[in-house]
Amino acid sequence: MFAYGTALVVVLEAAAGASWPMLLLPAVCAASSIFVAALAFLRGATLRDLDRADFLAFVLDVGCTLAYLAVWAARAGGLVRPDLFELAAVLLLAGAAGTSITSFIPILRGTYRAPDQERPWPWIVWTAAYGALALATLMASAPSALLIYPGINLLLHALVAALSVRRNVGALAAGHVAG
């Protein structure tokens, strides 16, 4: 699901006018997610293994893809002006980035309930990466819609990082060294 959604975001951001430096982080995320998804499927995972929220995010991403293909075909057929195509790409980008929220609900809930099951440092690193992408997007004077993806992901990754840091604070208070 992350593989498909992130790959879709790369396509939509490119259609919305993102430069290659702005596409680099989402493209690396997509490639890594595709690799992990391929490994999962090789080990027997199926779409039926997704929980309801993850399946909903996947269905919404597929819907965004179908809508994008329809708008792209209409543009190729001369039925949609280029400026309207760009507007459609931005709206679909917002929808696709919004599915990140749905995707993170199980992660956030699980980390809230059991912060000791998550390590904070990977989430802190991803938060910094999305912060850097947001800053690069701002500095490039890119269309403001291109801030949707890094903004949402910056917030979501920071929330998981903050929730997982509770594990370390609790361990320090108990006199244990956190790993």
Image (tube, rainbow, N blue to C red):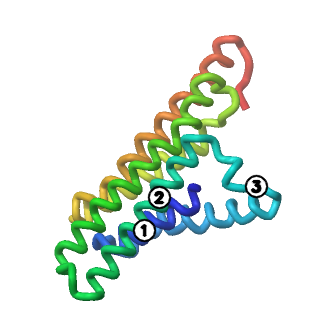
Q: Are marks 3 and 1 in contact (CB under 8 Å)?
A: no
Quick one: quadrant of the N terminus?
A: bottom right
* Disc with the residue nearer the chain's start (3 vs 1): 3
Give amino acid for label 3: Ala
Residue located at (32% from left, 71% from top): 18
* Disc with the residue nearer the chain's start (3 vs 2): 3
**Which label number is shown at residue 45?**
3
Q: Judge by depth and name the residue closer to the eye, 26 or 93.
A: 93
Position above or below: 164 against 38 = above
> Residue 12's x, y, as percent?
37, 68
> Residue 108's x, y, as percent?
54, 33
Residue located at (66% from left, 34% from top): 118
Q: Are marks 3 and 2 in contact (CB under 8 Å)?
A: no
Residue located at (39% from left, 58% from top): 133
> Is residue 16 rendered to the left or right of residue 51?
left
Give amino acid for label 2: Asp
Q: In the rendered image, which quarter is residue 2 located in? A: bottom right
Q: Is residue 22 visible?
A: no
| Residue position for label 2 | 61
Secondary structure found at label 3:
loop
> Residue 160's x, y, as percent?
53, 35
Secondary structure found at label 2:
helix
Q: In the rendered image, which quarter is residue 109 located in? A: top right
Alpha carbon distance from label 1 to label 2? 9 Å
Number of numbered markers: 3
> Residue 162's x, y, as percent?
51, 30
Give amino acid for label 1: Leu
Mark 3 residue crowding within 10 angstroms, few (<14) / some (14–19) / many (20+)? few
**Which label number is shown at residue 66?**
1
> Which is closer to the viewer, label 3 or label 1?
1
